[in-house]
Amino acid sequence: SVMPMVYTTIAEGEPWSWDRLIEEHLDALPEGTCWLPLYTEHNEAMLKRQARLAREREMIGVAWYSAGLIQTYDRWPVVRSTVNALAD
């Protein structure tokens, strides 16, 4: 399996946009072999937007970067709400 290290935001029309880079990885790999990265420092709205897009594709799951940032900045409520958005 693969976890691309893509920690950007969704930025429409930009070559480095999270959704564009993720789509390139997912299209190049066999279905169900990719983890999708979520960067803990993004705001909750961006993380939920990314989670909704992730849910639409065949993936293994999401991977958070980083556990240290989650702990240091007490981002557990944001992680929890984003995971709930994946389950909706």
Image: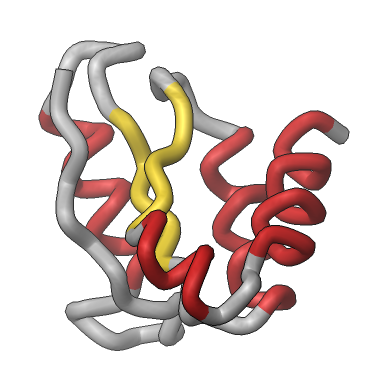
Q: Residue furthest front?
A: 72
In this rendering, the answer to whether 37 lies above or below 57 is below
Looking at the picture, the colour scheme in use is: secondary structure
Residue shown at 46% from the left, 27% from the top: 61
Residue shown at 64% from the left, 73% from the top: 74
In this rendering, the answer to whether 79 lies above or below 58 is below
Quarter containing the N terminus: top left
Image check: 78 left or right of 39?
A: right
Q: Position of residue 39 (x, y in %)?
A: 41, 66
Residue shown at 42% from the left, 79% from the top: 9
**Along the line of sight, the residue nearer the viewer: 61 or 31:** 61
Image check: 26 left or right of 54?
A: left
**Along the line of sight, the residue nearer the viewer: 44 or 23:** 44
Q: How many marks?
A: 0
Residue shown at 29% from the left, 69% from the top: 7
Give the quadrant of residue 58: top left
In this rendering, the answer to whether 75 lies above or below 19 is below
Q: Residue furthest right?
A: 88
Q: Position of residue 38 (x, y in %)?
A: 43, 57
Q: Position of residue 78 (x, y in %)?
A: 72, 65
Quarter containing the C terminus: top right
**Along the line of sight, the residue nearer the viewer: 76 or 56:** 76
Image check: 57 left or right of 59?
A: right
